[in-house]
Amino acid sequence: MDIDPTEVEAASTKKLYQGVCDRFEQNASFMKLDAKVHAIMSQPKAELMIHFPVKMDDGSYTLFKGYRIQHNNLLGPYKGGMRFSPEVSLDEIKGLAMLMTLKCSLAKLPLGGAKGGIKYDPNEHSMDENQRIARRFTLALGNNISPSYDIPAPDMGTNAQYMDWMMDTYHNLYGRKIEDKAVVTGKSIACGGSAGRASATGYGAVYCLAEWAKGNGIPLKGTRFSIQGFGNVGSHAALKLEQLGARLVAVNDHTATLINPEGIPAAELAHYVQQQRGIKGFQPEHEVDDINLFWTKETDFMVLAAMESTVNELNAGLIRTRLIVEGANGPVTTEAEEIVLKKGIQIIPDILANMGGVIVSYFEWVQNRNSEYWNGETVDEKLREKLIAAYHQVETVSKEQGLSMRNAAFVEALTHLEEVYLKRGVWP
Ligand code: NAD
């Protein structure tokens, strides 16, 4: 039977949303989360769906569908990325928005959670068209975004260039005030971005991994790791791990799978991927056709930095590593997690492992609002400090309450939100 690829994609985004909801319900029930907090948290505060027309290079008009899901703003302004991808769906964005609320709470940031996106493939459009799409989406969002209300950032399919266009559009339309720069984060440094933002998520994942290794008495030097996804998160995680003496032995992305026990040079591969948009062709002699060879490759650590639900009930049993680090959001389905944990493999969950991005986004927002500029060392030091603190909070809850690191992270994040809700009350 032929499988329609769009059905597979729909199933994986459905799995992400269902997985986030299931994990929320399971932990809310375990910790006996206050009933009103439970009810409020179970749905986003607002779901914006916008159709907007954009002029194409050939003079025709295409109607695009954009989303912005504002999950919760108890702790501060809504915060979360903008994903431009043909797989974007309401369910996917809702799941990711809830993860953002939990992530910001776990990181103890004065920010809430949101996510947005447009259902289209930027690779199939010229940069002029992409610019008009990003600007027109910003116009359509209107004052639903602002530096003190909802602050987008890059995600899959967007980058600093898109954030620069969004900030410029907002500035010209609504504000023309100095603090307008803070309406989005992840901008280029020239336009008010922060040093260290591009590497923050990948480095953050490695700071967690290094704490885990230290706690388990494993020196990083000489260890082997594999990475799925070699974009922003995956490449920076690989570079940092390599700096710490570990060896990259397997990589998989949407173009190929590469296995080389002698080691794959991360910096050279990152440079290659920037030019070629994929790992295919980098070391053709080490390319393999069977992706299962990636899952079965024995390593000390596996970093998942591609997309949601890539580890599922079909391949979870094949994995041979000590630790999975979730650089991506929701890469391990709930069914797969059960299989992996039973094998004694631990998981550093997404809301902890990839919080580095939103932490440095917060630093960017603070710098913009105060017209300050911090250098790369300052940002990295502050990032490490925050990540290590969050890692140990989660580890403590995990040990004290006998929970997996994922459940401990959920419980810790929900406990903070519950405390604030109970102190503030629900008005009126
Ligand atoms: P990116 O677009 O730079 O890279 C994505 C990578 O995934 C690419 O290497 C691509 O080839 C690979 N990929 C895509 N589809 C794949 C498939 N079907 N199989 C294997 N590989 C595939 O994106 P990114 O910014 O690195 O984000 C990766 C993940 O990390 C996403 O889940 C994103 O939500 C999450 N994340 C990113 C940040 C950030 O700061 N960039 C922060 C938090 C979480």
Image: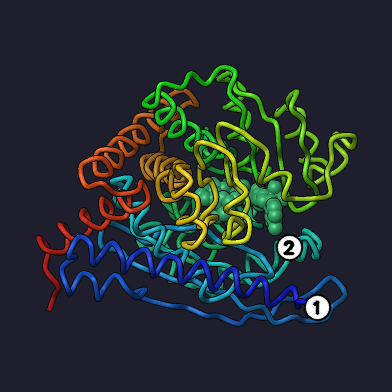
Question: Which residue is disc 2 drawn over?
Answer: 122
Q: Residues within 10 Å of mark 1 (few under 14, many from 20)?
A: few
Q: Residue at x 15, y 57 (%)?
A: 419
Question: Which residue is disc 1 drawn over?
Answer: 2
Question: Against 142, is 411 above or below?
Answer: above
Query: CB at mark 2 closer than 8 A to ligand 1?
Result: no
Q: Residue at x 50, y 26 (%)?
A: 376
Towards the viewer: 137 or 122:
122
Q: Is residue 145 left or right of residue 409?
A: right
Mark 2 is on which residue type? Pro
Residue 256 on image: x %, y %: 80, 48
Question: Against 116, is 62 above or below?
Answer: below
Give the secondary structure at mark 1.
loop
Question: Of the numbered discs in the image, which one, if any, rests on residue 229?
Answer: none
Q: Quadrant of the C terminus?
A: bottom left
Give the secondary structure at mark 2.
helix
Q: Is residue 142 left or right of residue 247?
A: left
Mark 1 is on which residue type? Asp
Q: Nearer the viewer, mark 1 or mark 2?
A: 1
